Image (cartoon, rainbow, N blue to C red):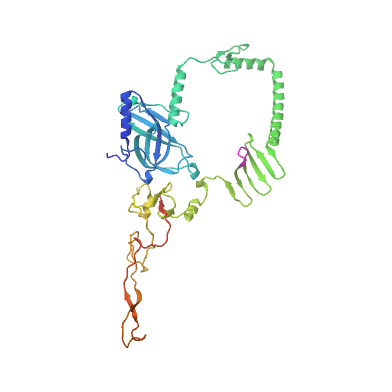
Amino acid sequence: MNQTYYTILTKQGAALLANATALGIPLKITQMAVGDGNGNIPKPNASQTQLVHEVRRAAVNTLFVDQENPNQIIAEQIIPENEGGWFIHEIGLFDEHGNLIAVGNCPSTYKPKLAEGSGRTQVIRMVIIVDNTQSVELKIDPAVVLATRQYTNDQITAKMTAHEKSTNHPTATTSSKGFVQLNSATDSTIESQAATPKAVHDTFEYVRFTDQKAQSAFDHASNAHNRITDVDNVLSNVTDRLRTPDFESELFSADKRYLFVVRNDGVAGVYNTYKNDFSWFFNSDGWCGGFIEAPRVGGLDQFVRDRTPPVGVPLPWPQVYPPAGYFECNGSTFNRDHFPKLAAAYPHGFLPDLRGEFIRGWDNGKGVDANRGMLSWQNCMIESHNHSTPIRLVGEQGGGNPWGSGGDRYEGDYTFNTTHTGGHETRPRNVAFMYIVKAE
């Protein structure tokens, strides 16, 4: 297959689909899973029974037949903004018994979660081609899944269209909404009919021209009453929303949910009465507490760069799997277009294999470890050296024996090479960590 990204039915899925067609019992597809492929984008394999490295599995949100292609079934899943922290490289579709029906891959996508400072709701779509779509039950449980915006809009449009074509509308009453009949009479007492603009106009003209003086007096009295009411409302609102206890002054919002506080210790901010906590505040030293979007913080990028190791620096990690957003230094290749910062450190497009290796500082002209290239590998070695020991010759006679005739004679030290036995390598004491690099 020449395509880079595609979806296939697994052998298990094809068998179950054929069995469903033969027995006339639809196959129930209920769940979708995504995985990070252990840091790689795997090629779908029909023999798979699970994803390479699954990171999330949940119910399918939408399952329907493609209107443009009746042999294609489209499944969608919504990943909420509070879930994530991993890359999406592979997708799987499962039936109600947990059998992997179809498997596919996709371009590398990082799903952030809200706690990381950037959250988004992400829709994962999977398309599978079958010979008979009637062999698959296109049913989802609305009680446990979210709906995409498109699905919701389609449902609303369908309901509104059906409602507009229907004539089964109730008649309006004084206690319920519905259709009303218009009436232009100015003296009507029927409560199920509404006055037309003409009726309102005629009534107004009658009142205005029958008693001009009464109308004028009413206008003056009304204006005076309105001014008094406005003053009362202002005073009432100020009294109702402003409070000054001994330690602070408080100004409430109209719904009493928030209040602006200025305290005697210099703290000023907005307090949330539902959460019983400050939404944001400043203290007397100008220190701010609360959530501020990163782009609005001046110099944040430089602050982070000054305190973050550059992309490409190997970091020791105490787990058997790298965290989300990192690769293991295992000699594998990576996509330089997807990870340009990592490619700047490793322009050949593959990571150093640091599994079981020590890192040594580059000689750079010092002469201790000369003629070494950057990232070059070096085998183990033991520095050549000598061992010495005195040798005793037993029973040698002669006048030159300083210890007397018939005694043992001792000569000077004899130097010789020796071999030490032990393990398969020479090494210092150490602790095993996984070396990882940030994938950006």
Front one among 316 and 314:
316
Can you say whether 108 is above or below 16 in the image? below
**Hey, which residue is sitting farthest bottom in the picture?**
399
- Picture quadrant of residue 406: bottom left
Total numbered badges shown on the rendered structure: 0
The reply, left or right, for residue 21 in relation to residue 274 is left
Stretch in magenta: 272-277
Residue for point 67% across, 41% down: 250
Is 275 inside the magenta-drawn segment? yes
Residue for point 31% across, 86% down: 398
The reply, left or right, for residue 173 in relation to residue 351 is right
Please provide percent x and percent y for residue 278.
Answer: 61, 43
Is 294 inside the magenta-drawn segment? no
Can you say whether 294 is above or below 195 in the image? below
**Hey, which residue is sitting farthest front in the picture?**
406
Front one among 204 and 175:
175
Is residue 296 at all visible to an observer of this figure? yes
